[in-house]
Amino acid sequence: MYRFKPELRIPGPVPVPSEVSLQMARPVINHRGAVFKEKFPDVLSRLKLLFGTENTVYMVTGSGTAGMETAVSNLVSPGTPVLCLVGGFFGKRWAELCTAYKAVVHVLEFPWDRGVDPDQVAEFLAQHPEIELIFAVHNESSTGVLNDIEAISRARGDHQALLVVDAVSALGGTPCEMDARGLDVVVSASQKCLMMPPGAAFIALSERAQTYMEQSEASRYYFDLRRYQQFLEKGETPFTPNIHIVFALEEALRMMEAEGLENVYARHLLMRDMARAGARALGLELLVSDADASPTLTAVKFPQADEFRQRVRERYGVEFAGGQGVHAGRVFRIGHMGYATPLDVLTALAVLEIELKKFGRATEAAERVMAAQ
Ligand SMILES: Cc1ncc(COP(=O)(O)O)c(C=O)c1O
């Protein structure tokens, strides 16, 4: 058997461009030294364009969940009434985190194959004026649903609740427009659309969320954003940061800026459309409708999903992700985010086609390629 070129087609972590990888090999520098202090605030502030905010973006060393916990630990104190919008594994994670921090947790459940219904959110809020925080997921990676986060934000009307958004697999792959959409807290991470290895989370707060966070009685230490704010004024972080992610971020942002954000988003939409057209031409059933489809990953229903994934991994070195939660074993997910191009989607579809034949699902090669084109 020949040696594989590993091909990560999962919804994160994603392949990293060599320009970014090279940054990870740079010598370690003093995180309290002049070079870091000059670079760090400048690089972080360039993330504002992706968040669509005028407000400060903070970096926390840790994975995406560390970013989520930063949000919860800075906002939730025992007894805080919160609403979690759950339509998948990561919505559920918000509810678990809020429970861990002793919030009074209300959950609105949505089927794990479609978006959050803003009307139900509005209806719930009308009956619950006490809710202070709403937790939502922009792009639910467990299902491949892109929620209409703007409609969820609008569903609040003049209700007081702050909207906290997990944009871990969305930021950099689809417009966030935090300020324009009235999102109060947005969390993301390095290893998805931002084309970096895992190791850092990013978080931004609206002015209202900033005030709420400062006045909150919440217990916090490592994730205390008040410390991050004080230290950022000096160009530092309160604790030793992932220095190399800062180098990597500078390069990843340079690449995205050079491509142009509009082109980055258009590339993700093209990959989404190719993956969906190609999978359909192969006779596969998609988990979510076109209206709810994510630009960064595609979930495909398949009864022998795990056996199929193992076979594809062993024979081609291509990694697809498995189903999560209720979809475990019955869905596989194709990641097309970050450092991915339409050619990568064609490769994934070619592998699917060849292997599907062995699962008794043959179609004509031309049909697949033409559908994708
Ligand atoms: C939407 C979403 N939220 C949160 C996370 C959690 O991130 P991490 O695994 O980096 O903690 C992920 C990771 O897959 C995700 O896709």
Image (cartoon, grey):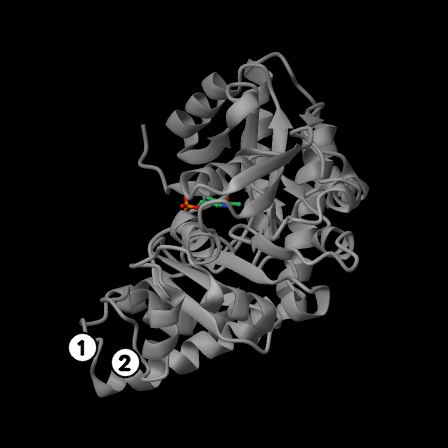
Question: Would you say 108 lies left or right of 316 here?
Answer: right
Question: Would you say 51 lies left or right of 148 here?
Answer: left
Residue 306, labelled with which disc?
A: none
Relative to 29, residue 104 above or below:
above
Dividing the picture into quadrants, the one containing residue 349 is: top right
Q: Amino acid at mark 1?
A: Asn
Q: Is the CB atom of the residue marked by disc 2 within 8 angstroms of ligand 1's nearest atom?
A: no
Residue nearest the observer in this picture, 46 or 274: 46
Residue nearest the observer in this picture, 234 or 295: 234
**Within 10 Å of the Cα at label 2, are there few (<14), some (14-19), or many (20+) other Cα atoms?**
some
Residue at 73 percent of width and 30 percent of height: 280
Circles 1 and 2 in contact, beta carbons < 8 Å = yes
Location of the N terminus by quadrant is: top left
Specify whether residue 205 is in view.
yes
**Residue labelled with disc 1:** 30
Q: Residue furthest top?
A: 360
Residue nearest the observer in this picture, 324 or 8: 324
**Within 10 Å of the Cα at label 1, are there few (<14), some (14-19), or many (20+) other Cα atoms?**
few
Secondary element at tag 2: helix
x and y percent of residue 51 in the render?
Answer: 58, 67
Residue at 75 percent of width and 38 percent of height: 371
Dividing the picture into quadrants, the one containing residue 115 is: top right
Secondary element at tag 1: loop
x and y percent of residue 190 in the render?
Answer: 42, 58
Relative to 53, residue 290 above or below:
above
Mark 1 to mark 2 CA distance (whole Å): 7 Å
Q: Is the CB atom of the residue marked by disc 1 within 8 angstroms of ligand 1's nearest atom?
A: no
Label 1 vs 2, first from the N-terminus: 1
Question: Would you say 151 lies left or right of 186 here?
Answer: right
Q: Amino acid at mark 2?
A: Phe
